[in-house]
Image: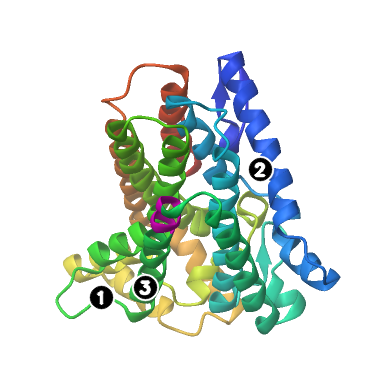
């Protein structure tokens, strides 16, 4: 048994392992090439997060999905570079919006160079992704454009909040489908599509990616509360400090509204206070880590991961399918 990709994913088939490893190496080279500029400072800023590492979760999915067709088709590696560039670009923008100070264990771009450089660097990465897409054909451009629209819509809906009468948890899950699920779905779609897989297989893998993407983000929500910075690569409770309502907080508020328990109401009031104060922030983290709402968020994560696994049922049994199933299990393990 060997290990490849994020979360210690095990790949038992040597040929599959070799294909995936070679693909990820080629993606890494492609990312470095795509982030080069004639202006050295732009290269430095654009490669800041590339060189910081990362799980390369989306490129891994491209490689695994390509196994259902021709895994050596010429569009596979470039499409994996596109989805990772797009993801990286959103990280630059997210860190500005969240005023984050750490990303992937290094100072965020906005901390190092300021908000303007971080935003423009994200734009630069979007531009480079578009250049690569142009060579992959109009269908690839359309797929990516629709996903990007969903991604931005999800971010706007998160900022705007739920409409009156809308369940906040349902609203949040819709947000995640756009913000995270859309690009993970495209990763699976590109891998299958570029490999020439049957359309039914492309659709199955796209559905799988959407559900896995939501599970992946829900696991991140749990980690933001439960982990330390060494595990997650960013400051614990970043979303909490910025007042961004992730699923554990939404489950807490839901419970407080339903049961009216004094300790739940008090914790909600603490979350509504100024969490830029380090002592308040630490106390909020401590209480949330021990609260049933965090366990409920873990159960939600498991449910989405199981839905992703169930989506794979129509696919033939093979090592690539086994690896995709194991990714569902790895996401659940990641959430504890």
In the rendered image, the residue lying farthest to the left is 165
In the image, taking residue 327 as reference, residue 60 lies left or right, namely: right
Q: How crowded is mark 3: few (under 14 residues within 10 Å), some or many (20 or more)?
A: some
Residue at horizontal 38 percent and vertical 76 percent from the top = 156
The numbered mark at residue 26 is: none
Front residue (pair 56, 127): 127
Mark in front: 3 vs 2: 2
Give the color scheme: rainbow, by chain, secondary structure or one colour.
Answer: rainbow
Residue 221 location in percent, x, y? 45, 57
The numbered mark at residue 27 is: 2
Of the two numbered discs 2 and 1 on the same chain, state the one appearing first in sequence.
2
Residue 256 location in percent, x, y? 25, 69
Of the two numbered discs 3 and 2 on the same chain, state the one appearing first in sequence.
2
Q: Which residues are the magenta region?
A: 139-144
Distance from the alpha carbon under mark 2 to that under mark 1: 38 Å
In the image, taking residue 18 as reference, residue 271 lies left or right, namely: left
- Residue picked out by circle 1: 162
Instruction: Determine whether label 1 and label 3 are within 8 Å by CB.
Output: no
Query: Which image quadrant: the N terminus?
Result: top right
Residue 239 visible within the image: yes
Give the tally of numbered discs. 3
- Residue picked out by circle 3: 158
Picture quadrant of residue 168:
bottom left
Distance from the alpha carbon under mark 3 to that under mark 2: 31 Å
Q: Residues within 10 Å of mark 2 (few under 14, many from 20)?
A: many
Residue 30 location in percent, x, y? 69, 47
Mark in front: 2 vs 1: 2
């Amino acid at each position: 048994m060997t290990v490849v990709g994020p979360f210690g994913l095990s790949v038992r088939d040597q040929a599959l392992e070799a294909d995936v490893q070679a693909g990820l190496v080629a993606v890494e080279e492609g990312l470095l090439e795509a982030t080069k500029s004639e202006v050295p400072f732009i290269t430095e800023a654009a490669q800041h997060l590339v060189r910081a590492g990362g799980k390369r979760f989306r490129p891994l999915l491209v490689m695994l999905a390509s196994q259902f067709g021709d895994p050596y088709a010429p569009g596979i590696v470039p499409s994996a570079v596109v989805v990772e560039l797009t993801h990286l670009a959103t990280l630059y923008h997210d860190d500005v919006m969240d005023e984050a100070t750490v990303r992937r264990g290094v100072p965020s771009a906005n901390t190092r160079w300021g908000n303007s450089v971080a935003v423009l660097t994200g734009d630069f990465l979007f531009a480079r992704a578009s250049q690569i897409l142009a060579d992959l054909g109009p269908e690839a451009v359309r797929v990516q454009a629709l996903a990007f629209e969903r991604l931005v819509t999800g971010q706007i809906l998160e900022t705007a909040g739920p409409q009156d009468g809308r369940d906040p948890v349902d609203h949040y899950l819709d947000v995640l489908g756009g913000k995270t699920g859309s690009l993970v779905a495209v990763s699976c779609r590109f891998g299958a599509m570029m490999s020439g897989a049957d359309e039914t297989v492309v659709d199955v893998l796209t559905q799988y990616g959407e559900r896995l993407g939501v599970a992946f983000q829900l696991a991140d929500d749990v980690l933001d509360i439960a982990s330390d910075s060494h595990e997650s690569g960013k400051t614990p409770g970043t979303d909490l400090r910025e007042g961004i309502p992730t699923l554990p907080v939404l489950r807490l508020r839901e419970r407080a509204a339903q049961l009216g328990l004094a300790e739940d109401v008090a914790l909600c009031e603490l979350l509504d206070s100024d969490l830029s104060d380090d002592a308040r922030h630490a106390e909020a983290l401590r209480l949330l880590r021990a609260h049933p709402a965090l366990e409920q968020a873990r159960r939600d994560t498991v449910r989405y991961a199981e839905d992703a696994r169930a989506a794979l049922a129509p696919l033939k049994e093979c090592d690539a399918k086994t690896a995709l199933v194991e990714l569902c299990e790895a996401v659940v393990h990641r959430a504890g």
